[in-house]
Image (spheres, rainbow, N blue to C red):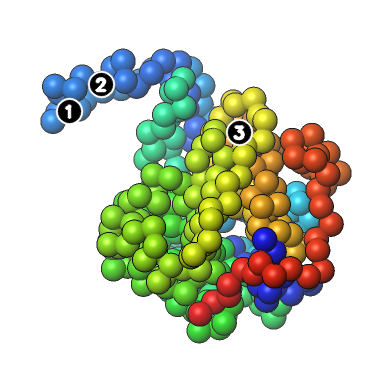
């Protein structure tokens, strides 16, 4: 189950497109379901008294690049930021993230996400786009530098996501399409057009169902668009789906859940780090499980920290020693078509 034929340059960068945002994370010490009346859904007017509130650095591009940096992988962010981005930029630069692809719009503020989580890990989220609305003005081909290895198209302004996918196809750059929460904002035609030719589609199980419903695809015809689908299943792990092959079921890593926000972004970082190292797909998935476990044990999406040695030990504690990638394999990961 190898990624050895994915044309990833060992000295290359992972190009990460997507949102940069500040997260306002609030904790409701109860359950939403106890305060929402089914017979009043037509006129919801409700507030929750929260017990905690934290302002955190976030956004999918920032989260993914941060975790890739912890794993020792070079990444470049291509994204739109606002006039309040300076301190966030310093944080990413301190961790070795390349920001040459970021455009700062001085007449806008950086996007802002307001998340309330209840004790059942349900979330209610409001998102102010800010500078992210300008992301469609950015050209991936002009900003990806001279050594791109792989592109992650993470949630962003929908128009920007479509542009980045198109430019990745034109450049022959393998890309992972991660529509995430934007499956609700994009119509089926746009989702299908963006995903066409992707080496990988990455979604959770709910987003997977929405993606299929909107695009009119099913478990088999999905592969007319993409070569592989990575579906995360929360506390049950994940699965990797490919045309004509059995699913690869990935178990979760043991974790003490504190905050589920950002688990998906961390998973993608671990999975792509495995691809960059030439690991088998099942190992890539398990690396994703370990990175997401670290993320959910901290409040916020960039609060986790570990050395590469600590990561390898935690992988070993869950799944056995992290394998040395095989030089040869007959089980290939398809490339951009």
State yes or no: discs 1 and 2 in contact (Cβ < 8 Å): yes
Q: Nearer the viewer, residue 179 or 250?
A: 250
| Residue annotated with mark 2 | 36
| Residue annotated with mark 3 | 296
- Secondary structure beneath dot 3 equals helix
Q: Is residue 232 visible to the viewer in this orientation of the structure?
A: yes
Write down the quadrant of residue 326 in the picture: bottom right
Write down the quadrant of residue 183 in the picture: bottom left
Q: Is residue 78 visible to the viewer in this orientation of the structure?
A: no
Q: Residues within 10 Å of mark 1 (few under 14, many from 20)?
A: few
| Residue annotated with mark 1 | 41
Residue at position x 47%, y 74% in the image: 197
Quadrant containing the N terminus in the rendered view: bottom right
Q: Is residue 90 above or below residue 47?
A: below
Q: Nearer the viewer, residue 308 or 137?
A: 308
Q: Is residue 90 above or below residue 52?
A: below
Q: Residues within 10 Å of mark 2 (few under 14, many from 20)?
A: few
In the picture, measured across the screen, residue 153 lies left or right of residue 184, that is: right
Q: Position of residue 82 (x, y in %)?
A: 50, 57
State yes or no: discs 1 and 3 in contact (Cβ < 8 Å): no
Distance from Cα at disc 1 to Cα at disc 3: 31 Å
- Secondary structure beneath dot 2 equals loop
Residue at position x 46%, y 46% in the image: 204
State yes or no: discs 2 and 3 in contact (Cβ < 8 Å): no
């Amino acid at each position: 189950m190898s990624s050895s034929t994915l044309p990833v340059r060992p000295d290359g960068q992972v190009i990460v497109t997507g949102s940069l945002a500040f997260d306002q994370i609030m904790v409701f010490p109860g359950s939403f379901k106890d305060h929402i009346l089914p017979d009043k859904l037509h006129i919801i007017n409700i507030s929750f008294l929260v017990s905690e509130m934290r302002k955190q650095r976030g956004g999918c591009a920032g989260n993914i690049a941060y975790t890739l940096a912890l794993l020792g992988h070079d990444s470049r962010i291509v994204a739109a930021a606002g006039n309040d981005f300076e301190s966030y930029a310093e944080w990413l630069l301190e961790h070795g993230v390349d920001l040459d692809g970021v455009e700062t719009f001085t007449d806008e503020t950086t996007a802002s996400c307001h998340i309330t989580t209840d004790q059942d890990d349900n979330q209610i989220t409001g998102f102010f786009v800010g500078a992210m609305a300008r992301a469609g003005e950015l050209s991936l081909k002009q900003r990806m530098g001279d050594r791109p290895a792989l592109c992650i198209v993470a949630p962003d302004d929908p128009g920007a996501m479509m542009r980045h996918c198109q430019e990745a196809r034109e450049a022959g750059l393998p890309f992972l399409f991660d529509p995430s929460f934007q499956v609700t904002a994009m119509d089926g035609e746009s989702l299908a057009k963006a995903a066409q030719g992707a080496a990988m589609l990455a979604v959770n199980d709910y987003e997977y169902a929405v993606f299929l419903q909107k695009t009119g695809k099913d478990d088999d015809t999905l592969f007319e668009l993409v070569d592989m689908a990575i579906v995360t299943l929360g506390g049950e792990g994940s699965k990797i789906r490919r045309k004509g092959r059995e699913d690869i079921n990935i178990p979760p890593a043991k974790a003490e859940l504190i905050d589920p926000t950002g688990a998906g972004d961390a998973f993608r970082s671990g999975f792509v780090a495995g691809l960059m190292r030439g690991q088998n797909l099942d190992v890539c998935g398990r690396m994703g499980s370990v990175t997401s476990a670290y993320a959910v044990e901290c409040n916020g999406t960039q609060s986790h920290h570990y050395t590469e040695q600590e990561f390898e030990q935690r992988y070993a504690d869950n799944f056995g020693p992290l394998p040395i990638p095989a030089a040869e394999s007959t089980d290939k990961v398809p490339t951009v078509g």
